[in-house]
Image (spheres, helix red, strand yellow):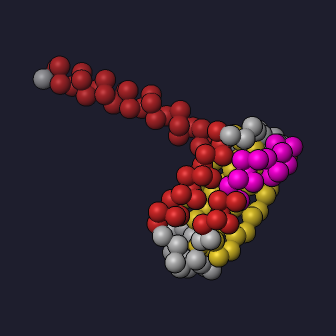
Amino acid sequence: MHRLIGTLMTLTLGLLLTTAPALGAQSAAPPAGTVRHVVVFKFKPAATEAQIQEVTDAFVALKGKIPGIVSLEHGVNNSPEKRNQGFTHVYQVTFTNAAARDAYLPHPAHKAFGELLGKLGVLEDVFVVDYTPAHD
């Protein structure tokens, strides 16, 4: 019985030690000067799940190809408010600073991503918002 309790305590402690840093990282304020680049896509009704996944995979791959990207997150709209106007897929790129974002825009890997979007022909519309997080 003591062995079972000890094993459970060890597993619980291990779980806490491995997940606590990730939880803390999500709530930490970004460094001053950080720029967030939010891109939201509205795909054409004919776009297949495979094509959308190809777009997402290519977008995510930019993190490993372009310097100055701190993180890249993505997800699908799940708001119950129904005010997304058909925009469904969100990609948020965090850059070290505005200069890194400015270098990303004309970067060959970013241009190749744009060419892929044109080749696939699945995008109906896109909007982009950049901002520097306020530190209150």
Looking at the picture, tell me which residue is in the foreground, 118 or 64: 118
Q: Residue furthest front?
A: 119
Left or right of 39: which side holds 49? left
| Numbered circles on residues, count | 0
| Residue at horizontal 53 percent and vertical 32 percent from the top | 21
Q: Which residues are magenta?
A: 99-114
Residue 58 picture location, percent across and down = 60, 52
In the picture shown, does residue 84 fall above or below 108?
below
Q: Main secondary structure of the magenta part?
A: helix
In the picture shown, does residue 11 fall above or below 109?
above
Residue 132 picture location, percent across and down = 80, 51
Left or right of 125: which side holds 135? right
State the quadrant of the N terminus.
Answer: top left
Looking at the picture, tell me which residue is in the foreground, 65 or 16: 65
Residue 40 picture location, percent across and down = 66, 66
| Residue at horizontal 62 percent and vertical 71 percent from the top | 121
Looking at the picture, tell me which residue is in the foreground, 62 or 25: 62
Left or right of 40: which side holds 77? left
| Residue at horizontal 55 percent and vertical 52 percent from the top | 57
| Residue at horizontal 25 percent and vertical 28 percent from the top | 8
Asked which quadrant contains residue 41, the reply is bottom right
